[in-house]
Image: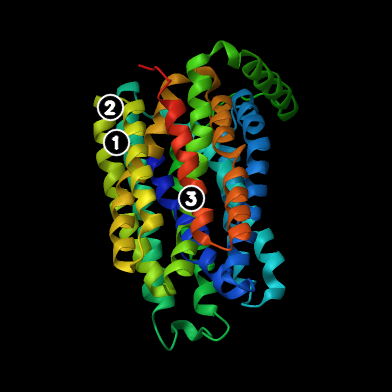
Amino acid sequence: MTSKEWSWASYDFANSAFPTVVSTFVIATYFTSAVAPDAVSGQAMWGWMQALVGLSVGLLSPVLGAVADAGGRRRGLLFFFTMVTAVATAMIWFIRPEPGFVLPALLLIGLATVAFELGTVFYNSMLPGVARPERLGRVSGIGWAMGYGGGLLCLGACLVLLVQPNPALFGLDRDAAEHVRAAALLVAAWILLFCWPVLLAVPDPVTRPPVAQAVRQGLTEIRALLRDLPNQPVLARFLLARLFYTDGLNTLFAFGAIYAAGRFGMRFEEILLFGIVLNVTAGLGAFLGGMMEDRLGSRRTVLFSLGCIIGIGCGLLLVESKGAFWGLGAALGLFFGPAQSASRTLMARLAPPAELGAWFGLFALSGRVTGFLGPALLALATTTFASQQAGMAVVVALMALGFSVLLTVRAR
């Protein structure tokens, strides 16, 4: 790989600490088990928060992507949203394990998540500018694998330095959950430390129009894209398919640790160990998937991965033992990376080069415009049936629907 390709892929290493530690394995579990009144209401509140995040990202991402296309400011916007993610994440340190901190926790985590998702719009749209067409799948897969590696290392640091030691290191008060809350500070520092290569190695165009002009051109571009979408049947069906299966993948990723903690009584240490195993298998899957994708095709890679995730997901709903959950969960990780990485590559191959930011905005829109649907249905089912299993069954149904639509997509 070239230095520019490595610099681009390294951003996955930096920002993947956020979804791994904050959205999934540590802060999400801390919120439902220590801040919220109980696990069921905690999962429901987390679901409604994620639903609002999805709606916000769905509304903002296409417009900002088009503005970045018109104004040549992808790097500047990536820098801005990366900083917002880091600062909002660091503020989670102040969330104490008391029900009175529920609203501040949801606001901070929601803001950080919106900024994280918007930053990935500009990061993803840089991919065709750093890799040749025949190397898109490989570079995307390596980036995703590096992301799992970064999430794994940050999660391992949380486990070894913060969660496990008793008495806690650095004078942290375990009774006030400072050893868990400090994970947010570690993630913020991780992002700030490792985000720089892509910002230095992938510059914006030298000549850029004024901001007001870029905004006008960007809004014009996104309106034109939306009007032309019916004339782009392949792209339209792909985005529709991704709308459903990514909603399922995001919901599964966001609520997996919450489900494990509530259903199987897994403690923080167990959840972190499970997260480490999952990241190892997911990183391996992303790396191997990227190698195979350039030969087999992005669409086939996504379909195969989704089919395996759906089958394993059904098994996870039925198992009763913690050991079976561990085994199936580890196997599930093998197909997470290829499904997501190949989707990103397929979008890069299909979208017109001059409109990549706007199309990746629609790509983010397809993954987030109904991002409220999965968490909302999960929250509704969890509340209605007082069952975490019922809530998680929604995830499998969404992915199966996306899989069915993707079968109708015919792409090179």
Residue 305 % position (x, y): 33, 38
Q: Nearer the viewer, residue 146 or 1?
A: 146
Which element is circle 3 on? helix
Q: Residue furthest front?
A: 385
Image disc number at residue 393? 3
Q: Quadrant of the C terminus?
A: top left
Which element is circle 2 on? helix
Residue 209 % position (x, y): 67, 23
Which amino acid type is shown beneath numbered disc 3? Ala
Q: Is there CB contact under 8 Å for labels 1 and 2?
A: yes
How far apart marks 3 and 1 lie (CA) works out to: 29 Å
The residue depicted at 43 percent of the width and 26 percent of the height is 406
How far apart marks 3 and 2 lie (CA) works out to: 33 Å
Quarter-of-image position of residue 311: top left
Q: Is residue 77 left or right of residue 239?
A: right
Q: Is residue 253 above or below residue 132?
A: below
Q: Is residue 109 left or right of residue 263?
A: right
The residue depicted at 47 percent of the width and 33 percent of the height is 402
Q: Quadrant of the N terminus?
A: top left
Q: Nearer the viewer, residue 1 or 371?
A: 371
Q: Is residue 246 above or below residue 380?
A: above
Residue 232 % position (x, y): 53, 14
Which residue position is annotated with label 1? Answer: 290
Closer to the chain start, of discs 3 and 2, is 2
Which residue position is annotated with label 2? Answer: 294
Categorize mark 3 by other alpha carbons within 10 Å: few (<14), some (14-19), many (20+): many
Q: Is residue 12 above or below residue 156?
A: above
Q: Is residue 256 left or right of residue 276?
A: right
